[in-house]
Each structure stands twice: as C-alpha cells, then as structure tokens.
Image (cartoon, helix red, strand yellow):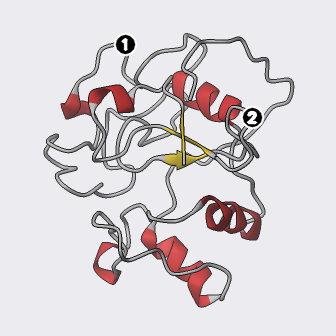
Amino acid sequence: GSDTPHRVVLTKPFCIDALEVTVGEWMVCMAAKQCPKPEQAHPFVTYSRKLLDHPVNCVDWRAAKHYCEWQGKTLPTEAQWDKAARGADGRGFPWGDTFDATLALVSGSGPGGPAPGIVGASPTDVSIYGVRDLAGSARDWCGDAAFDGDPTLRPVRGGGWTSLPSGCHLGRRRSL
C-alpha cells in the first residue's frame, strides 16, 4: 500500500473503542452464534479460554465488521484510525517519533513475548486520545471497502506483536 502522506479532513465527530476486542468478548459473540471461531491453523493464534483478556486474532475483515455491527458499532475508517492513533501532530508512534520496542507489545519487548499479551496492558502504547495497543499487540482492521482502489483488499493499521519496527509505525498502510 501507499505510505505517501496526504491530507484528509474528518467532517464529523466519531467515537472509537479505546481497547482491542478480547478473546472473551469474541467468545460471547460466538455463544450468541454471531461470530465464527477464529482460524486455528495460524501459528500465532491466541484463541484460548486461558487467554480471555488477550486480543482476538486470526479473524477476517468480514467477521470483524460483523462483530462491530452486532455491537451496534462500525470498524473505523483509515482516516478515523489514523486520527485516533497519531493525534493532531501526526506522530509516528503513540509516544513520539522514535521507535522503542520496550514501549509496545512486540516480539522481543518482554511482556509481549511471542504473543500479544493482555489488552491495554502496555502503559506506553497509548495515543493522546487514550486509544491503546496501536503500535503493538494486534493489527487493526479498518472499515474502508477497498485498499488503494482494489476491492479485494482491506486495510489494516497498526503493529502486531510480531511486527518489525517499520511495521509498528502508525503511518504505515498495509492490506490483507
């Protein structure tokens, strides 16, 4: 995807959840027969009753979108996610413009280890608006219907616990 900066104006106020969806929250949706069980074939899946406070992962865009709708919400657009993550000053990471693996739940950072860790546990991976786990933990789906004009691709933003420093930069755009 394109990482070229461009100006976007948000004309309406919006709300965004401060925390990622947990395994426990996803299990409630599964119990209501509204959400599928996350894909278990992925080597980094953390779906387990022992990890109820960890972020659900290995969920595709359609399932994430449906979960939000079931909750009476929507996935944020890329512009909304960007504003909530980067603030008005367009910072590269929630804490500033220099990457530091100890400030987010990423591989090798300690608390993140080889898995994302507890949702919201990192005291430093927090935007100026209070949104947590943006540079690490699990990547976030955005609600845009296409990525760079390709209707088969959906945008994801933020870093995950396996991300390299470049993948944690909040301005980085990618798709799945």
| Crowding near the residue tagged with mark 2, few <14, some 14–19, many ≥20 C-alpha atoms within 10 Å | few
Residue plotted at (51% across, 22% down): 171
**What type is the residue that disc 2 sits on?**
Gly
State which quadrant residue 1 falls in: top right
State which quadrant residue 73 falls in: bottom right
Q: Position of residue 126 (x, y in %)?
A: 42, 34
Quick check: 22 above or below 20?
Answer: below
Disc 2 is placed on an element classified as loop
**What type is the residue that disc 1 sits on?**
Asp
In space, the residues marked 1 and 2 are separated at their CA atoms by 29 Å
Q: Position of residue 57 (x, y in %)?
A: 44, 63
Q: Are marks 1 and 2 in contact (CB under 8 Å)?
A: no
Please state which of the two labelled residues, at mark 1 or mark 2, is closer to the viewer. 2
Q: Position of residue 155 (x, y in %)?
A: 61, 42
User: Which residue does the numbered mark 2 point to in the structure image?
Assistant: 149
User: Which residue does the numbered mark 1 point to in the structure image?
Assistant: 97
Q: Nearer the viewer, residue 40 or 159?
A: 40
